[in-house]
Image: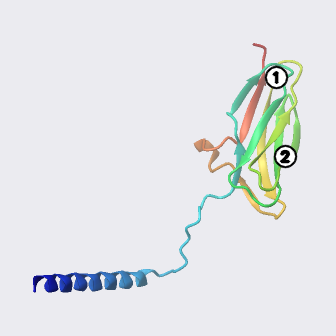
Amino acid sequence: MPNNMNFKNKFFLLIISVSFMVASCNDFDDDNLDFSNSLNPYVEFNSPPAVVVEPGVDVNLQVTMRVAIQNNLSVAYTVTGDVDDQSQVVIPAASLSSFITIPGISGEGQAIVTLVNAQSEGSEEFTVGRGDSSLGLSTTSVEINWANP
């Protein structure tokens, strides 16, 4: 008789547990739960915020993006200082990065390369940096110093 009672108690607890689980499913007001990553797609430099090289040396700066996409991504940038330019670099479809090459100058000097905006061929806008630049979460501009050792 004790085994039969033990089985009845376990069965009763199972029925109550399942009932509570089913009843708790109805507590949600919205069945459209979003489990996606809420961080916007962004681009940034994969570089320290300052680079020092000898005069005449070209500088290659890697521009990276958070997620690969199926379209090319055009990233506009400006260069100010002893080198003055504005252009864009294309991160190819299904890639995560590309390089900007800043030609070296013959003497000592400085330039600042700043990412301006990024847009895919499918017109998807990307954020420049991961958030507020004052928080230092991303490198969105790089200072290049050409200096003699």
Side of 118 relative to 66 (left or right): right
Looking at the picture, tell me which residue is in the foreground, 36 or 21: 21
- Relative to 104, is 4 above or below? below
Label count reads 2
| Residue position for label 1 | 109
For the residues labelled 1 and 2, the Cα–Cα distance comes to 24 Å
Residue 85: give x, y in percent of width and height.
88, 38
- Relative to 7, is 77 above or below? above
Residue 37: give x, y in percent of width and height.
59, 61
Q: Reading the chain from its start, which is encountered first: label 1 or label 2?
A: 2
| Residue position for label 2 | 89
Q: Which residue is drawn at 77% across and 22% down?
A: 53
At mark 2, the secondary structure is strand
Q: Which residue is drawn at 73% across and 39% down?
A: 141
Q: Residue at x 64, y 45 (%)?
A: 133
Q: Residue at x 82, y 22 (%)?
A: 109
- Relative to 8, is 64 above or below? above
- Relative to 95, is 28 above or below? below
The part of the image, by quadrant, that contains residue 142 is top right
Amino acid tagged 2: Val
**Which part of the image, by quadrant, shows the C terminus?**
top right
Side of 6 relative to 29 (left or right): left
Amino acid tagged 1: Gly
- Judging from the image, the colouring scheme is rainbow
Closer mark to the observer between disc 1 and disc 2: 2
Looking at the picture, tell me which residue is in the foreground, 40 or 114: 40
Residue 21: give x, y in percent of width and height.
36, 80
